[in-house]
Amino acid sequence: MPFDKILIANRGEIACRVIRTARAMGISTVAVFSDADAGSKHVQMADEAVRVGEAASAASYLQGRRIIDAALKTGAKAIHPGFGFLSENAEFCEAVQAAGLVWIGPPTGAIRSMGDKIESKRLAAAAGVSTVPGYVGEIDSPEQAVEIATEIGFPVMIKASAGGGGKGMRIAESAEDVAEGFRAAQAEAKGAFGDDRIFIEKFIVNPRHIEIQILADQRGNIVHLGERECSIQRRHQKVIEEAPSPLIESETRAAMGAEAIALAQAVDYVSAGTVEFIADQDRNFYFLEMNTRLQVEHPVTELIHDIDLVEWMIRVAAGEELPFRQSEIEHEGWAVEARVYAEDPLRGFLPSIGRLSVYEEPLGEGVRVDSGVREGDEISMHYDPMIAKVIAFGADRSEAIERLAGALDGYVIEGLDHNVAFVNQVLGAERFQSGALTTNYIAEEFPEGFTPAHGAGGADEGMLVALAGQVLRVNQALEAADADGAYTVLVERQAYSLRFEDSAEGLSLHVDGPKPGSAQFGADVRDWRAGKRVYSCTLGGRALVLQARRRGLVWTVSHGGRSVSLTPMRAEVAALYDLMPEPKVVDTSRQLISPMPGLLRSVAVEVGQAVKAGETLAVVEAMKMENLLTAAVDGVVESIPATIGGTLRRDEVILTLEQG
């Protein structure tokens, strides 16, 4: 046993992940927690727990001295930082070691050199790693930026040296874009990182984000565990990851792996780490950055290599030698991961805060869920909005995708908004299934964002109505048929007629809808009982998982990211709906409404002030993000009922405008 006790300097999903491995190794664990996390899952799972501060991360999980004191007080021998928070903080790493504790991660030199994007590119080039054409150095002015960009050739990417998470990044197509983008990126980087150094490099058209997982021990042995494809991103944040990549073949994999190892050797790397590359569609690849920590998406690599990366981080930190060499490493099968976030896709993916009133994680062959929550837990405004990661393993890519989609269909989350329907639609898209990916995929496939039309039945409406009919029938919700033996259900004010037939093959259903034509559906009902939300069946020989919810007379059935809501009623009652007027839409353009729960950080106007459409009126903070709220129309501020520094509910009115 490498250590008898370790402390995890993190929270949520990754803290639970490290605790599970430590427990399997016979190692005791110490959790740290803020006031907001006092009753959280990671605190419950750990053998001991120590409070380190108030709810805000700056007052708790970023308090390195308190975390070190907690380790010393409890007798922990080592600290695992997880990811985020202090995981790539060289000063914290040094302080841990100065206190006589073991740091479960890379040395401070590697953290420092790879944390500076300008320095990391210099080191990469010196180590023979392919780098994107660009200017690797500090740029002092917009004029110099324009000169450099013109020499490189448009388009270019403007980046903050200390950047991360998409902050301080701009794409420029022209000299005018460069001048404007340079100022904006510099200001954003200064505010986010306290470091306004900017560099410029060539922008790769239709790029793919490919990263190589490495693992190194303290004796100079370094191996790579192949690549992960992380191209499905939204605003530079990863949404879906997979291993291996559908783009990369063995020759390119070996070349990328060799360069990743060369960079690791150049900085005397130890522990798990990731070298990220950007690749074009012809498999030309260029160094992007190195993450000196465990990655969020590490499970897909673990599944195809049957290796526990957290375990080997712990063993390497204790001085153990890697028992395998590069020639012995092979991958098998395919793994795909989806990040499930508390966010509202219909509101531009704004964070959603609330309590998980109903929460049931999916099960199934090849399915793994890494989470840090339970039913009844609250998703707080203070931390990252990720609820869980759902990962599926299969013999090949299509099987892994199918299993992941089925798992998401069976994932029950109520009490707040989430992105499950959105992710499932991405998985089901023909372009995704063909592997034609780029980092622009979401922007290209959802140019207007995720709208209510995406979640509606659409082309699959007939299938969803049929599935809903099965649910209704099995639950005996249809008490009596119409005179002709048909059951009528209303879907979006349109009447569908359902006819059932019992046979040895199962329950068949004939659907006549308001649109021309009809469809014959046959379904075999399995594993269903009244009141159950997740429902398994076969439709046309295809195994499906769906969810069904009943609220009053209305049933909502969902599958593949789409849903229909239907109400069973007699045909003569359904016909009356054609005579009813469409509901009126309330005009809220003269109200500034908080799109999410959060803190009202500031209001930029005062009563009586004239404002123009698009002008910033207020800033609301939620989940470590500041959201600028702007005026929808011209007007004059009439009232400001909200209080600066106060907590806002979703849809709470911050201020109102009158016509100017």
Image (cartoon, grey):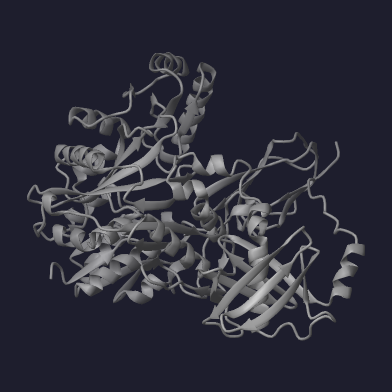
Farthest residue, direction front = 504
User: To which quarter of the image does residue 400 belong?
Assistant: bottom left
Work out whether 205 lies above or below 590. Answer: above
Q: Position of residue 379 (x, y in %)?
A: 51, 64
x, y percent for residue 440: 49, 39
**Residue drawn at (48%, 60%) of the image:** 340
- Quarter of the image with the N terminus is bottom left
Q: Is residue 637 left or right of residue 400?
A: right
Image point (30%, 35%), residue name:
116
Q: Nearer the viewer, residue 171 or 334?
A: 334
In which quadrant is the C terminus drawn?
Answer: top right
Left or right for 73, reference 385: left
Any part of residue 478 in sight: yes
- The quarter of the picture where residue 530 lies is bottom right
Q: Residue at x 43, y 28 (%)?
A: 157
**Which is nearer the eye, 609 or 454?**
454
Q: Could you tell me if residue 60 is visible in this image?
A: no
Up/down of 507 relative to 580, above or below: below
In the displayed structure, 166 sits above or below 517; it is above
Residue 435 picture location, percent across and down: 42, 46
In the shown orientation, is residue 127 left or right of residue 179?
left
Q: Is residue 10 above or below residue 349?
A: below
Residue 585 percent across, percent down from the top left: 82, 54
